[in-house]
Image (spheres, helix red, strand yellow):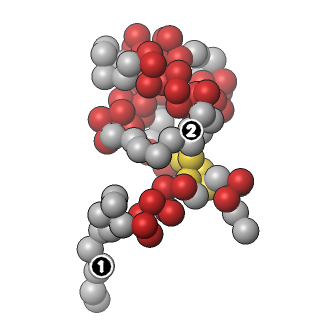
Amino acid sequence: MTHSAPLPITDPRAILLLMEMRLRIPELLSEKETNAYRVARDSGGRISYSTIYRLKKARGRLEAYTNDVLDALCDVLGVEPGDLWERDKKTRR
């Protein structure tokens, strides 16, 4: 069984994959009855208020996410990585 190497983020195919996914930040904040300020505070500095605010305002549609931010979101919101993501309905065919 052969495995293909991960796509570098500069590869257009990788960027397309990111464009088809979004973080469920607004929904998770609502489900957890919290807000951007609390997430930033509870992250202990791992997520800045401006970062979580931008994610909320953009409805999770940003071009780049760091693993550190994703890890901190999972910790603070008490979710697994798969709970953060959903396919972006706007890009579905």
Residue 4 shows which numbered tag?
A: 1
- Label count reads 2
Residue 84 visible within the image: no
User: Label 2: which residue?
Assistant: 60
Dot 1 crowding, Cα within 10 Å, few <14, some 14–19, many 20+: few
Q: Is residue 85 above or below residue 58?
A: below
Residue 2 visible within the image: yes
Tell me the quadrant of the picture where the N terminus can be found: bottom left
Give the mark nearest the N terminus, 1 or 2.
1
Residue 43 rendering spot, x and y as whole percentages: 36, 18
Q: Residue drawn 28% across and 80% down?
A: 3
Q: Residue drawn 45% across and 42% down?
A: 80
Q: Is residue 17 above or below residue 46?
A: below
Residue 90 rendering spot, x and y as whole percentages: 71, 54
The image quarter containing residue 27 is top right
Element marked by disc 1: loop
Q: Residue drawn 57% across and 15% down?
A: 35
State left or right for residue 15 relative to residue 22. left
Q: CA distance from mark 1 to mark 2?
A: 28 Å
Inspect the image, locate mark 2, and give the three-letter code of the amino acid beneath it: Gly
Residue 61 rendering spot, x and y as whole percentages: 56, 42
Q: Residue drawn 30% across and 16% down?
A: 45
State left or right for residue 18 relative to residue 35. left
Tell me the quadrant of the picture where the C terminus can be found: bottom right
